[in-house]
Amino acid sequence: MANSPFSSPLIAFLLTISSLFHLSHCTTTSIHDFLRQNGLPGGLFPKDVKSYTISETGLLEVYLDSPCLAKFDTMAYYETVVRGNLTYGGLTGVEGFSQEELFLWLPVLDIILDDPLSGIILFDIGLAHKNLSLSLFEDPPDCAPQSQGNCFSSCLFF
């Protein structure tokens, strides 16, 4: 069998170059624009995101300078690193993001946008599913620095 221009070393090289371009492209796009490109509202994360990474398996990791609190319809708490599995219109298996409900801090497990025309985004907070207006997440929120230690004196996390 004759070597063709599409031999496996050439294909491996092209795939490597392609993946490097993809990774560099992701890091130059803001997290807010990246979320919009993936069917989610840009305001899910605060304005002051330091950086983010996305793996080949879809694991999204978002890095903040410090834990912080933001206000949507209720208070939201972001740890220094927030992780989740990104699919088009969804972030599942979320870690590092909690929402205040009835004086308790409950972890946000999944964020799903099934139908953008509905104007509703679903937050799975374990005990319940909350349907929130997409308009709450159009713009990235300001996020006030908050240490987890300070929050435990006045907050209960589960």
Image (cartoon, grey):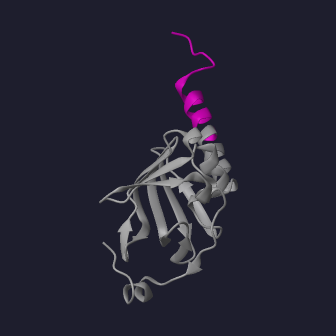
Residue 136 position in % (x across, y down): 59, 59
Nearest the viewer among 22 and 153 is: 153
Q: Residue furthest right?
A: 28
Nearest the viewer among 117 and 145 is: 117
Which stretch appears magenta?
Answer: 1-17
Residue 152 position in % (x across, y down): 37, 85
Residue 151, relative to residue 22: is it above or below? below
Counting every numbered tag in the picture gives 0
* 3 in magenta: yes
Q: Quadrant of residue 97?
A: bottom left
Residue 22, relative to residue 104: is it above or below? above
Residue 4, relative to residue 54: is it above or below? above
- What residue is shown at x 65% (from left), y 56% (from top)? 138
Instruction: Give the quadrant of the C terminus.
Output: bottom left
Residue 153 position in % (x across, y down): 38, 90
Side of 111 where 137 appears, left or right: right
- What residue is shown at x 52% (from left), y 43% (from top)? 89
Residue 61 position in % (x across, y down): 50, 59
Side of 27 where 2 appears, left or right: left
- What residue is shown at x 34% (from left), y 75% (from top)? 157
Nearest the viewer among 29 and 1 is: 29
Nearest the viewer among 58 and 87 is: 87
* 133 in magenta: no
- What residue is shown at x 51% (from left), y 83% (from top)? 146
